[in-house]
Amino acid sequence: ESARERPRLRTISNHSVDPVVASRVPTPSAAISTGQPLPIEPYRKELVEAIAEHGLLVIVGETGSGKTTQIPQYILGHDPNARIVVTQPRRIAAISNAKRVAEEMGERNLGNRVGYAIRFEAVVSPTTQLRYVTDGVLLRELVDDGALSAYDVVVVDEAHERTVGTDILLGLLKQCKRTRPDLKLLIMSATLDVEKFSDFFYGCPIFQIPGRPYPVEIMYARNMRLAALQSSFVDRAVDTVLHIHRHERPGDILVFLTGSQEIERAVTATEKLDAKLDYRGDVAHYHSKDPDGRRVVGMSVFGLYASLETGQQREIFEPARPGYRKVVFATNIAQTSITIPGIVFVVDCGFVKQKLYDPVTHMDALVVTPISQAAATQRAGRAGRTEPGKAYRLYSHEAFSDLPPNTEPEIQRSALLDTVLALKAMNVHNVQNFDFVDAPNPDLLRLSVESVWVELRGKGAADSKRQAQVYELRRQFFDRTGDHLALYNVYSAWRDHDYSRSWCRENMLHHRALEQAQKIKRQLESILDKWSVPDTSARDPTTSRIDPVPILRALCTAYYPNLAKKQVGRPVFYQYAVHHGKRADSDALMSLAIHPTSALAAAVEKDDPRVGEIEWVFYHDIMYTTRANMRFVSRIWRWEWVEPYVPRLDRAMAAAAAPEGTEDGDERVEKAATRSENPPPSASSSGADD
Ligand code: ADP
Ligand code: MG
């Protein structure tokens, strides 16, 4: 019902020429690039008023309409003291927009009134009022100051891209807005499906800037399926550029490819072919008929991708030399982030390189995948900015119809290790309850790994002698704290044996699972590096032994609420809470056993005094057989580790469980062992279920 009440401040025009917009008198800033007014300019006054009136506003307008470069300037024109931050999903866009705006505002240097900040690089000063930053930079500022007191206006740009960074940002900004009612929050999108954002922000108004001044004709490649195209799109793109160059009227060409390597290859191939063209015979023949009498004598070919030197980009935005046709081979960055003036022809390869979760390795990979129909429409739209254009799709109309209508948000297709860690770094511990625009796929939130232990099968499984041998092999890695450090011991031993495959075989360990662990370890290291988390090793520098306490404490808080408390005199546990964040009342309590493969299983069954009495444990997951088994279980030595994270814990349970704190792990084992003679009043007061 919020959709019905939501104010629509503007409606979008259809796809034909809008003569009102096209005939407006240009302001000086717009004249810099095209000599035509930007679609946003007629709405300056209305926009400024809407922003002044609403603390939350969604702004939607076609790529190139002027959202990123103009709106912050409009705000500064209205309130010269405003402090504004504009986020971009891509570094290159943060830099290029800051440069452009500084130029339009007549700033001599970047970093005075206008600046940018990307990771490891900030061109700002205390006088900087308008900052273009990557979403990662603003996320980090939110960690330091949850109220974002350095800003009056926060603009989340390119929200339609739905990167993980942007999605987390939206959730955190929603929280921030509660403590900062005066903060202006603008969400900007280049695509029309913005209801979602409005709904997320309490049905806030949507300001639509009428768009697409010129029609774009779409050409399809006959019978070309995406599967066949995938291996040949670079060559086909180059051929199509040549075709356009020889047979179409003058006008610049934008080609969408997927990555820097292909782009460089295409640039070289096109330049070579261009050098061989007979401009007196071939091309000039066609262009001699051009009504403007323009003759094309060559192509200026460029590549545009994220890692490109910023110096090289400048020329891309400048008009081609007279008589030359500009050709830009670009990644997805040119789809909505960066507008290149003068584009009349678009060539769309139909693919994009994006992050995808690989269920086999449980990791994200950058994969070349087909684009969505919405993305294809965006790409085609780049051709109709300054005059009627043409888009050449390198695939067939049937292939287009088979494309998914929309691109899935990144958060729903990536492994989310990054997301979870980012949120935990921001003290958001219950990721599953975090307020997301679109919740992540819960299956992806669990980072399930193949077991490292080789299980006996068939005859071997029935052979008790064989089983005892396997158990002895496992026992060499066991740790009295539980399975997590046992796994660590396995990994260290494997490393000490030069990551050997035969050593794994001899010890009944899955080599592939360990390799996977190694990959994840590297991935985690790179994430820690990305978030500038210092490498504080858990190894004692003098004894070079591992101190289990910081490791277990970290794991324990990470696994919350996967906690369980042992029932007195029985080898089963109470589950702390079945429903996250809910009180552990009697309905929610459930009996859990320890999986027989656990390092703690024997100790729990026999109340092994070497392990000491076990009270609280945390576990990785539950496997249901005839009973519910906790897998990968470790002990919680000190209740204080979890205390801050269990705000709604039944106090009686907590008090019963809390051991007296001691300083070091070994002593704790002794204490725990002693206490076992005097069991605390049990959790049965909370009600057992069997
Ligand atoms: P939007 O954010 O709505 O996509 P922008 O504000 O980025 O639009 O761009 C508005 C116009 O400004 C573009 O159409 C383009 O003509 C011009 N422009 C933006 N950046 C540059 C630049 N670096 N060089 C030249 N022109 C630019
Ligand atoms: Mg923009």
Image (spheres, rainbow, N blue to C red):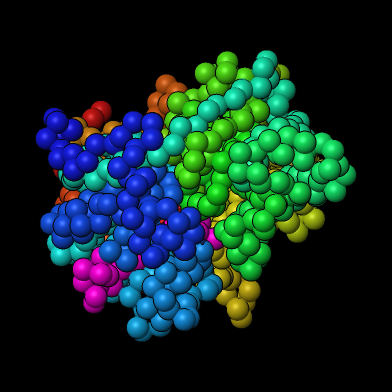
Question: Residue at coordinates 37% horizontally, 45% vertically from top-left?
Answer: 22
The residue nearer to you, when weighing 311 against 331, is: 311
Image location (x, y in percent) of residue 424: 39, 57
Whether the magenta-drawn stretch holds residue 89 is answered as: yes
Figure check: 682 above or below 177: above
Figure check: 609 above or below 216: below
Which picture quadrant has residue 85? bottom left
The residue nearer to you, when weighing 519 against 319, is: 319
Which picture quadrant has residue 314? bottom right
The residue nearer to you, when weighing 169 against 476, is: 169
Residue 394 seen by the camera: yes
Magenta residue span? 75-93
Instruction: Give the position of the N terminus as an image quadrant.
Output: top left
Question: Residue at coordinates 53% horizontally, 72% vertically from top-left?
Answer: 120
Image location (x, y in percent) of residue 533: 50, 68
Figure check: 587 above or below 634: above
Image location (x, y in percent) of residue 434: 30, 47
Which picture quadrant has residue 10? top left
The residue nearer to you, when weighing 670 against 326, is: 326
Horizontally, residue 230 falls left or right of residue 656, namely right
